[in-house]
Image (cartoon, rainbow, N blue to C red):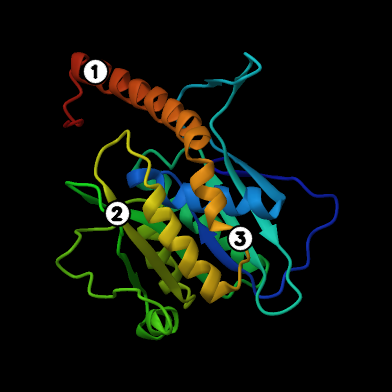
Amino acid sequence: MTWQFDKCFKKTPELNKPILVEGLPGIGNVGKVVVDFIIDELKLKKMYDVFSYTFPHSVFVNEKNLVELPSIEMYYLKRDKGADLIFLTGDVQPQDEISSYEFCDAMLDVLEEYGGSEVITLGGIGLPAVSKTPKVYCTGNTKSVVEKYKKGTKLNDKLYGVVGPIVGVSGLLMGLAGRRKIPAISLLAETFAHPMYLGMAGAREIIKVLSKKLGIKVDVKKLEKEITELESEMLKKTKELEDVSKQTALKKVQGGDMGYIG
């Protein structure tokens, strides 16, 4: 068992050609801020809790002074018109290359089970300084999906030479979706390239794009009001996971495992 999807519903939701929107931790945690905000604002129903033995070997101590495992979760939004939406969020991403590929394939399996029609991944582009008005770039696995999301927005598709490889789930989901002929696009907002920085401004710009293209009705102003609370919670978890990763890396080097370079 690599990836376990625990159902959080009694009756399987009937979804209409759902679009998967991914927002896992990354540069500036931009994608996670976007998806978590939408989930909270719209009070979405949870579909699955995702568990894996490939998660970091650690637990968090929560506000109740009890422990909880790192988690990845899926939520859904039923709509009267158009495609329904599935949102992917969590505390962590898969920790290595093989796990990342397996996880993305497992996610696409679930999407296909529900007759999924499209994938949107979210992330940040790290800059050496903070931008007050971040640009949002886009790229995808087909020209048509890029043009679809560019229309009527300020999305910039001139990404070649701006970034290198798109690492992790945000990139692999697009690539592997292409193998299954599922259109996929990534929205990447400029943010400050510091591990402790929370890319709220970039998240706000992505939410504006999603609101326009997907018809999601959320109050973006509320996002700015919640900055302090979100920063406190997310930066604490980011710091804890970084400490665990450093300890693991040190043990590998001390044990003579030179496969790790850092």
Q: Name the mark nearer the viewer: 2 or 1.
A: 2
Q: Which mark is residue 83?
A: none
Q: Earlier in the sequence, mark 2 or mark 1?
A: 2
- What's the distance in space between the residues labelled 3 and 2, CA to CA? 21 Å
Q: Which residue, given by chain and number where applicable, does mark 2 sit on?
A: 132
Q: Nearer the viewer, mark 3 or mark 2?
A: 2
Give the mark, 3 or 2, whose residue is nearer the N terminus: 2
| Amino acid type, label 1 | Leu
The reply to whether dot 3 and dot 2 touch (C-beta < 8 Å) is no
Label 3's element?
loop
Q: Nearer the viewer, residue 200 or 138?
A: 200
Residue 53 visible (yes or no): no
Q: In the shown orientation, is residue 54 left or right of residue 256?
A: right
* Disc 2 residue crowd, few under 14, some 14–19, many 20+, Cα 10 Å: few
101 sits to left or right of 48? left
The amino acid sitting under disc 3 is Val
Q: Which residue is mark 3?
A: 218
- Above or below, 109 against 93 in this view is below
Using a 10 Å C-alpha cutoff, classify the residue at mark 1 as few (fewer than 14 neighbours), some (14 to 19) or many (20 or more).
Answer: some
Residue 197: x and y, percent?
A: 33, 38
Q: CA distance from mark 1 to mark 3?
A: 44 Å
Q: Position of residue 116 (x, y in %)?
A: 61, 71
> Could you tell me which residue is drawn at 33 percent across and 71 percent down?
139
Q: Please tell me the numbered disc located at residue 250.
A: 1
Q: Is residue 23 above or below residue 187?
A: above
SS under mark 1: helix
Which residue does the image show at 66% across and 17% down from the upper left? Answer: 64
Residue for point 42% across, 30% down: 235
Which of these two is toward me, 221 or 93? Answer: 221
